[in-house]
Structure formats: structure tokens, C-alpha cells
Image: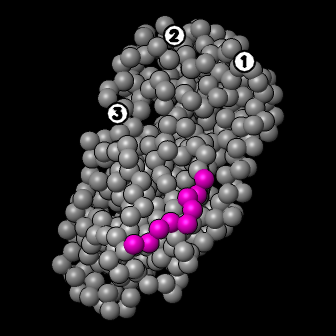
Amino acid sequence: MRRNACGPLALVAAALLCLALVGCGSSGDGTAGSGTTGGIGAAAENSSVAAPAQSSYTTLVEDFSNTDLGCGWEPVRRLDLQYARRLTIDEYADGYYLACLADGNRYLVVPEGGEVPEGLQDDITVIRQPVGDVYLAASDSLCLFQALDALDRITVSGIERDDWQIEAARDAMDAGRIAYGGKYRSPDYELLLDRGVRLAVESTMINHVPEVREKLEELGIPVLVELSSYEDEPLGRAEWIRLYGVLCGRDNLARERFQEQVDQVAGIQKPATGKSVAYFYLNANGAAVVRRPGDYVTRMIEQAGGTYAFNDLEMAAPGSSSVTLEMERFYATAKDADVIIYNASIDDGVDSLDELVAKNALLADCKAVQMGEVWVTDKSMYQQMLDAGTMMANINRVLCGKTEGLAYLRRLT
């Protein structure tokens, strides 16, 4: 049973266990992001690299919502989620909440001073409020804590300082408010204990190293494996702030922050612009990496009034978020695109049109390059999951020629 106690006795026992456990995890220096398509979050070995949309380590189920706690309690209401489809949140009497995730995991949020109900089913992980002293190994979740004015709840990061694209995270690490505690696959257990960590927020990358999750739970640290990056709708990803609002006791603020993004989308100029968009980056081998048709980035383009130039691709591997194309194959489609958006969240990006063309001379003949309709994303994009509405509004403004005051896109000249 995952009824994780975090009291003093548990920590003393955990400290004894730590001697045996420290150093036994996987080695390596990869950062963990959101674990799937990049969160708007990134995942995998580098916090800005998108991982598969669904790996064999994470299986989603259709009927995942199960409100039977095993103790006879019945929910008093279900939080109204508009776009998220991989999460349900039910409220019980006296401030208890149950979050059910689409991988079958369930989490009971127990209010401060509350008792764990007797007879609680074994599969439920207990998270006690006040939530704080968090070990964060899911990079695209930090923006949700920040939006809730709860960045101080994070005390240990699973992402190194220079891999954060969010300035507040770098500043907190520089000031020592957040310590680096090792990557998801090899956390520094001793540091987590020294820092009194009471919750680990992980991406689905943790499913690749189940022994790490087991060790954390043995140490009395509940593990929340979040699935926001498995949402197909961009606003569905952003709506996961509602879960963090419940965890932090700030659901009203979470609703306000999410509504701000809904309002951004509501302000998008209709109807569709009819303009096609090529969204890509060039990898180290010189090949073009584009998004899989139907993934959340392509949905952002479409909901912003554009047409994704590579909608007809059928080459994506099962579960993959991207497709790698030889340059000639890429050029055959991209040459006629009205707008090019270069994805600087993945590689080092480009600073000018000349630098882009220097990567491959074929790009010089693209219609968008000749018309000066080439844009580059801000590097923080994949770590700013909440701002999905702002990103769609930015794309729409580019397509409509209203290019002032953009937060996540910059024109290349």
C-alpha cells in the first residue's frame, strides 16, 4: 500500500535505509521533463528534447476514474475540467480530494491535520497537505507552481540549473532556495532526506526506472507521476494546473490562471487564415525533424487559424511525437509553406535568416524565407505548459500580420 508516512520516525528509518540505497540508482546525466511529447513540455534525456507521445512503459486506460476509496466515502463533487482528458479530480467531505490519472494511478490528497481513512485501498498514494519540500523532476510542471505563487514549495530540482529555461528557476537555484538533487533516474537520496522532501513530482520517464520509484517510496516520499503531456489538446495540458491548485490549496487561483489562457484562445481572430505553417528544427545530421500530424503542436497551429504543412505525413513511428525527414523530402513540402517556425526549444536555435540558410542552402528557396515569414520559438516554450493559450494567440497574430508584443515567437531577419 502506498500510504507514505513522512513523520520524524519515518525519516529516521529512511536515513538508515539511505546508506544502502544511495548510489544504487541508474547513472547518467539526462534531465527529465514531462515524459512524453514535451509539455508544452519536453521530456527525455534533455529537458528540452521531446520524447515519444506514449512509450511502452506507460499504458493509458479508458475507464481510469475510480472514486471507490475502499472506506465507504462518497465524493461530494467532481471538479469541472473543460479540456483535460487524462485526469479527474473528485472532492470528498472535509477537504479530501482524489485525483485519478489515465495510467490507473490514484492519489488521495489529505488536508492538513486530517487522518488517512481506515480501509483505504492499497493502490492509492497518499499526499499530505500542506504540500511542500517537493523534489521536482518534471520540468514542465515548474511553471504551474510559479503561476500559483508556490515556487517556494519546490526545494530540490531534478533538472540542472543550466537546463532550466525559466529564469525564476535559475534564480532560485543560484540563491540556494532550490538544490540540485540528481536526475530522475539517479536522485541523490541523501540530499532528499537532508532537505526533508515530502513529495516527488515525476514525469513518466520514471517508469523507465521503476526501482527508483520504489526506493523513493521506501524512504517515505510519495511519488506523483503526472501525465499532462499525454493530453492531445493544448489547453488540456494547461488545465493540469487544477491538480496543482488542489495540491497547493489554491484551486481558486488555479481556475483564474487557467481561464486567462482560455480567454487568450477566445480572442483568436476567426475564421482560419488559410496559411500553411512548416514547424521544424534541423538535427545534428542535417535532417529536418517535424511534428507528428495531430500532436499538440500541430493542434496549436490549427487552432490558431493555420494549416500544418505536414498533415499528410504517415511516417511517424507508433507513439512518436516527431518525424525525421531527409532534407529533400522536407523541402518538397516546406518550400510552399506560407510561414516557417523554427523550433529553438530543441537545439541551439538560429539568430538570423543567414544562419538558418547556412544550415542548409535549400531553405533559401522556400517561399516563407523569400517573403520574410520565418519565425523562431522562444527556448522556454516547452517548459511553459500553462501558456498554451498565449502561444496559440502568438501564432494567430503572426498569421494575421499583427506581430507586435509576441511572447514566444521572434521574426528572423
Queried whether the magenta region covers residue 73, the answer comes back as yes
Q: Secondary structure at mark 3?
A: loop
Q: Is residue 20 among the parts visible in the rendering?
A: yes
Which x, y percent locates residue 64? 38, 50
Q: Residue at x 30, y 65 (%)?
A: 123
Amino acid type shown at disc 2: Thr
125 shown above or below 57: below
Picture quadrant where residue 158 is located: bottom left
Disc 3 crowd rating (10 Å Cα; few below 14, some 14-19, many 20+) is: some
Q: Which residue is mark 3?
A: 319
Q: Nearer the viewer, mark 2 or mark 3?
A: 3
Q: Residue at x 62, y 58 (%)?
A: 167
Which x, y percent locates residue 215? 25, 70
Indicate left or right for 218 with 5 as reference. left
Amino acid type shown at disc 3: Gly
Please count the marks in the image.
3
Please report the bounds of the magenta region as a residue range.
72-80
Pointer 2 or 3: first along the chain? 3
Q: Which residue is mark 1?
A: 273
Amino acid type shown at disc 1: Thr
Between marks 2 and 3, how big is the CA–CA gap? 23 Å
Q: Nearer the viewer, residue 15 or 220?
A: 220
Disc 2 crowd rating (10 Å Cα; few below 14, some 14-19, many 20+) is: few
Q: Residue at x 46, y 61 (%)?
A: 99
Between marks 1 and 2, how big is the CA–CA gap? 19 Å
User: Are circles 3 and 1 on residues that touch, CB within 8 Å?
Assistant: no
User: Are circles 2 and 3 on residues that touch, CB within 8 Å?
Assistant: no
Q: Which residue is mark 2?
A: 333
Indicate left or right for 378 with 91 as reference. right
